[in-house]
Image: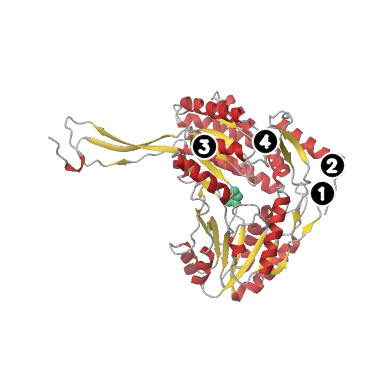
Amino acid sequence: MSHALTAPATRELRERAENLLRRLGVEPPAPGEISARTPITGSELISLPASDKAEVEAAIARADTAFRGWRTVPAPQRAAVVRRLAALLTEHQDELGELVTLEAGKIGPEARGEVQEMIDVCEFAIGLSRQLYGRTMPSERPGHRLMETWHPLGVVGVISAFNFPVAVWAWNTAVALVCGDTVVWKPSEATPLTALACHALLRRAAADVGADPEVHQLIQGPAAVGEQLVDDPRVALVSATGSVRMGQQVAPRVAARFGRCLLELGGNNAAIVTPTADLELATRGIVFAAAGTAGQRCTTLRRLIAHADVAGPLLDRISAAYRQLRVGNPLEDGVLVGPLINERAYDGMRAALERALADGGELVCGGERVEGPGDGFYVRPAIVRMPAQTAVVREETFAPILYVMTYQDLDAAIEMHNAVPQGLSSSIFTQNQREAERFLAADGSDCGIANVNIGTSGAEIGGAFGGEKQTGGGRESGSDSWKAYMRRATNTVNYSTELPLAQGIRFE
Ligand code: UN1
């Protein structure tokens, strides 16, 4: 299906992007080999150059040099940069949000929400700058003090994905900066323009408060650019968000040089709906989590495990809500589901649906491509009832497909819930406290995020974000995730005139 867009409309989108960039402090880049496309029409907005080997090398070197100074700036003073960034983001929330819509295809409210998530994490990081607490422990030796101190780690390499092109960068960067680290960012090749905008805002924030703008470096281009970052021994921490496959490449390479990794990889998130669930509330939570962002969040709800007694009425409600969803141009008010990022995503969705049907799945609704402006890939979110949790269900397909299975017994439901390789987010809808607690217990959900009576997506920044198993084990944003961005030193101070040895050892 092709609905070639008239030239003026393509031009209008291009001009819109250029305008937004200018208002965000970015001059239109020189043409180059990266093609910044909009999934709204599939057309090119702007092209820009990729970083070559020497440029990546130079960016890492600049970040490494900047680190030498930045690590000695007191953390509450480092926070000034992040405070200024938050102010700039607040001032430019609409422009940056619109650029996210153009580049990633998110609907307006979700795009602005993503910028809000950046502002939220900045606020968190500002407070954190006065709370980088170390412990003190009672020493077993008289006249001795035992304590730990947290120090900046070094250069942090941030590799981010197209689906949260700005928020995931901010989770890493706001925290890394107050921790005293410098950042080299390799964004997704699909979203280079929002990266230019964030980079410009951050450098401006640093300059405005008299800090060194070199604390942040941006490198752009294909996977090889990221690989250079991954392999460079000056990069102390590689924080990578993306597919399990990408993580499988990154982790061993970083480990081989004894660098640190923070991985946020695939999710295959499920919700269990029990017989006591408030079905109206569950429906709202499920529809946002499964169809929102066109199924392109790592926290998207992909599996619904419903008790056999409620599966029928629940599915009736969900499919009725699905039929109301407006799919289309995310720049239009009232549209709730924008485009898939590209044709590959669409092919992946189609292939998964075919496999699911071959496995005995029954299509409840959706799955078809619908007309949008230009050559964008617009689909109706799909629901497929599955006789069992087959191989295709255990894989993450980055598109809006909700597989539905039923259960009779909660233990079996939890077993099915955990029987996938990924472990990011999960939820249970129930009004029965025993069931809720069972789900959150040690033998309940095995995910990094486990919710009760809300969906799997849309986490707040205050908690630690991340997951287990193939999701990679990393934790970002809130709680004590900052510890991944610092190194810990244990200090023993002898303020006595004796030299007692630990463990009562006498060496005389
Ligand atoms: C992602 O999809 O990579 O919990 C991040 C959420 C958002 C972050 C998603 N706060 O859905």
Kindly check if marks 2 and 3 are in contact, taking CB atoms under 8 A apart as contact. no
In the rendered structure, which amino acid carries the disc numbered 4? Answer: His
Looking at marks 4 and 1 on the same chain, the residue that comes earlier in the sequence is marked by: 4
User: Residue at image x 57%, y 42%?
Assistant: 120
SS for callout 1: loop
Which of disc 3 and disc 2 is earlier in sequence? 2
CA gap, disc 2 and disc 4: 25 Å
Question: Which residue shows up at 65% across the image and 54% down it?
Answer: 398
Q: CA distance from mark 4 to mark 1?
A: 27 Å
Report which residue position mark 1 lands on. Answer: 373
Q: Position of residue 35 (x, y in %)?
A: 73, 38
Sort mark 4 into few (<14), some (14-19) or many (20+) by Cα contacts within 10 Å. Answer: some
Q: Residues within 10 Å of mark 1 (few under 14, many from 20)?
A: many
Whether pointer 4 and pointer 3 mark residues with C-beta atoms closer than 8 Å, the reply is: no
Among the two numbered marks 2 and 4 on one chain, the one whose residue lies closer to the N terminus: 2
Of mark 2 and mark 1, the one earlier in the sequence is 2
Taking the image as shown, residue 377 lies to the left or right of residue 205, namely: right
Q: Are marks 4 and 1 in contact (CB under 8 Å)?
A: no
Label 3: which residue?
Answer: 231
